[in-house]
Image: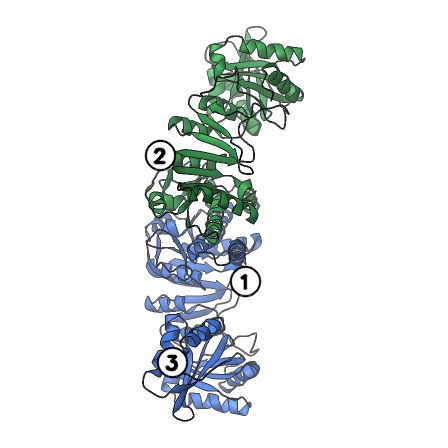
Chain colours: A green, B blue
């Protein structure tokens, strides 16, 4: 078997943990497998490097930030290779240049385009464990790029796809995917299996175990993912196209408190208004979610939507700059909101799932501001203070508890 | 003009110094020059990385040590690029992969073979300051190498040669090359000029400003070097083939206290004995210096020589292992010795220089153990405790004082 294993920064934060990961990989190696390991930078080292950059320059060039950040993973893989060699197992570390990890040019948020597998396959043939720097690529100008949040997961999935790996294991500090965040919902239960699509909705909605770009890639190339804990040997959750067990109505409940709501009040009620509003934001590459359009007073209309809180200032500035052209009266931003979602492939064949969610929120006395749905997801916007209570109420209502 | 400037770790140890170096390079840039800057790792960061490696493994694989160490210079060049951009001057940082800095495969002590100048020239054409990681190369297996002690100087000289630079400036924490180490000889005077050969002898003999590999390369490719201080604007010392001023008898006095003396006593007095002794050491890549062979008692002979103190244990072990084959009686090591040398191209045309040195040592009551000479150098082995006194006596005798 060819196994790709990915360990995050917490798993390689110090000498003891590095050796734990080394031993774990060596088990698979001695069982006769080919082992490729993707590592992130140690602990909070990427943040420390960013602090160094911002100490030098308020707005450092993104190309140079990537040049700086890529050292983090290179330190991890070289130290890991030393640990494995100390344990008498041959290992070799490779960075994005050595693997030829081709990416787009978008510094800080690049996408992997193509991976040359030649060097990795040669090292595997020589029975080495191959350690690859996560999170980084090289663009067509021969410059380092980084892949943005969750980039090392993407590296692992892309490698698994390119190498036609038999398994891609993502090691994290949780046991797997839960029906809800166990820190917020004590009765949350670990899922044995989940579909790519469900996982995509959960990742987007703030469950935060896997980044959606890595799940998208896993779906595209049918890479079977396993999410496991690096701290124990529990089985973890398998992410795949179709799940085999008789399925529950919904798989999970996710709460996202990183959204803010923007309301554009008193727009002219003529065709194209909504397009113009969202075009202004799209040009700034701001993602918009949960949109509500309603009729305002005296022939005007109002448009509300959510954006990530980090994008709030830029979104407001962009809209204000276009105020004359868009012709709105007021602009409001509400920060104290939460997005609560239920996700489940099962809801496609079961009407009434949304209604059941709304009923449970009504019973819990939680007010719903806005609603958005997809085939396998229902999202409601509620007040932030109600978030955790609402999450537990919905979790109970769908019998997800352990 | 195309200028290559090299700054060591002390010069980029913190934010303030990084900005000082940036401003210094920008002056040359605004004067219309093409500027290429070679940097070492910040302060003692290379040592910190080595500590990390040795914390993980007592004897880490050299290939992985190089993979780890190369991050040091990459941090320096990316931070410097940020500082220059903050000062509104376009700069770009490049590592050994991006420059294609081809080297031999000898990890930890590689030699540069060939540098592709295409990327650097393209960036210079775009009027960017080009920042290059010192100390590192890439071997034919596409693996990182490091160039050993003084490696960043070698990088700078090699770049200057490949780019046909008009000047190669080595910035250090001293003003230039002195007639003797000013910390040991208070009256030492800074030299305006010195020849490559003199500099080679001084570097080898422990003057320590420039590593001899970089001087050898400068000589080979006729790269005019300037050694200057990064802390002031003093003129520095020019290192070149022929020096133009009417020259002094000798250029400098060097003291090396890093040597130890090994005596092999009671060897059979037959042909090939000396060859066999030094062959044992050569096979361990141990450099031998100041050799003395003398007739011992009852038809035997003794051989004495010096090695670097770091090589002492290995040298003794190698000789002991070959004891039966070499057939010697005793092996002595003396640690408390010093090598005192005078260097000067002028001595070729002036007989009596060695005699003058011996006379000054006699007058100072310093005992000479062994003598070794070359065309432009005289070296004597003395007791370590006499070192500084002897150095000052010789310095005075040749009227080198300020």
Q: Give me the residue at 44% from left, 68% from top.
A: B211
Residues at discs 1 and 3 in contact (Cβ within 8 Å): no
- On residue A222, which mark appears? none
Same subunit: marks 3 and 2: no
Residues at discs 3 and 2 in contact (Cβ within 8 Å): no
Give the Cα distance between marks 3 and 2: 59 Å
Q: Please tell me which residue lies in front, B320 or A322.
A: B320
Q: Position of residue B240 (x, y in %)?
A: 38, 71
Give the Cα distance between marks 2 and 1: 56 Å
Q: Please tell me which residue lies in front, B327 or A332.
A: B327
Extreme residue toward the top, this view: A298
Could you classify mark 3 by the number of other residues whose Cα lies within 10 Å: few (under 14), some (14-19), or many (20 or more)? Answer: some
The N terminus of chain B lies in which quarter of the figure? bottom left
Q: Give me the residue at 56% from left, 52% from top.
A: B15
Instruction: Establish if A276 lies above or below B388.
Output: above
On the question of residue A251 being in view, the answer is yes
Q: Chain of mark 3?
A: B
Could you classify mark 1 by the number of other residues whose Cα lies within 10 Å: few (under 14), some (14-19), or many (20 or more)? Answer: some
Residue occupied by mark 1: B231
Residue occupied by mark 3: B326
Give the structural element (helix, strand or loop) at label 3.
helix
Q: Position of residue B387 (x, y in %)?
A: 54, 81
Q: Chain of mark 1?
A: B
Could you classify mark 2 by the number of other residues whose Cα lies within 10 Å: few (under 14), some (14-19), or many (20 or more)? Answer: some
Q: Give me the residue at 53% from left, 17% from top.
A: A250
Q: Position of residue A60 (x, y in %)?
A: 51, 42
Give the Cα distance between marks 1 and 3: 54 Å
Residue occupied by mark 2: A164
Give the structural element (helix, strand or loop) at label 2.
loop
The numbered mark, 1 or 3, whose residue comes first in the sequence reads 1
User: Of tags 3 and 2, which is closer to the observer?
Assistant: 3
């Amino acid at each position: 078997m060819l196994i790709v294993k990915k360990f995050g920064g917490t798993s390689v934060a110090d000498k003891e943990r590095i050796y734990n990961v080394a031993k774990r990989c060596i088990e698979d190696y001695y069982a006769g497998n080919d082992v490729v390991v993707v590592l992130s930078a140690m602990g909070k080292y990427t943040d420390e490097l960013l602090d160094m950059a911002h100490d030098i320059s308020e707005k450092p060039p993104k190309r140079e930030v990537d040049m700086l950040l890529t050292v983090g993973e290179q330190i991890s893989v070289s130290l890991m290779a030393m640990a494995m060699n100390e344990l008498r197992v041959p290992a070799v570390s490779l960075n994005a240049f050595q693997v030829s990890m081709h990416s787009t040019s978008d510094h800080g948020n690049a996408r992997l385009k193509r991976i040359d597998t030649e060097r990795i396959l040669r090292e595997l043939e020589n029975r080495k464990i191959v350690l690859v720097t996560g999170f980084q690529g090289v663009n067509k100008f021969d410059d380092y790029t980084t892949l943005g949040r969750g980039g090392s997961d993407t590296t692992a999935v892309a490698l698994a796809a390119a190498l036609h790996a038999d398994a891609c294991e993502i090691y994290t500090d949780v046991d797997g995917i839960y029906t809800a965040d166990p820190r917020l919902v004590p009765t949350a239960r670990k899922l044995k299996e989940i579909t790519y699509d469900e996982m995509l909705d959960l990742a987007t909605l703030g469950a935060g175990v896997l980044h959606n770009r890595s799940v998208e890639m896993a779906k595209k190339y049918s890479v079977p993912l396993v999410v496991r804990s690096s701290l124990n040997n529990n089985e973890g959750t398998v992410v795949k196209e179709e799940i085999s067990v008789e399925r529950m109505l919904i798989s999970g409940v996710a709460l996202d408190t990183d959204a803010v709501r923007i309301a554009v009040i008193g727009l002219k009620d003529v065709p194209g208004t909504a397009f113009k509003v969202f075009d202004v934001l799209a040009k700034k590459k701001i993602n918009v979610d949960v949109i509500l359009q309603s009729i305002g007073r005296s022939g005007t209309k109002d448009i509300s939507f959510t954006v990530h809180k980090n994008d709030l200032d830029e979104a407001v500035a962009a809209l204000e700059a276009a105020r004359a052209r868009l012709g709105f009266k007021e602009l409001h931003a509400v920060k104290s909101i939460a997005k609560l979602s239920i996700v489940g492939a099962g809801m496609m064949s079961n009407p009434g799932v949304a209604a059941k969610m709304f009923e449970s929120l009504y019973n819990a006395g939680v007010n719903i501001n806005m609603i958005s749905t997809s085939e396998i997801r229902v999202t409601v916007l509620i007040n932030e203070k109600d978030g955790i209570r609402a999450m537990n109420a919905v979790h109970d209502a769908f019998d997800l508890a352990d």
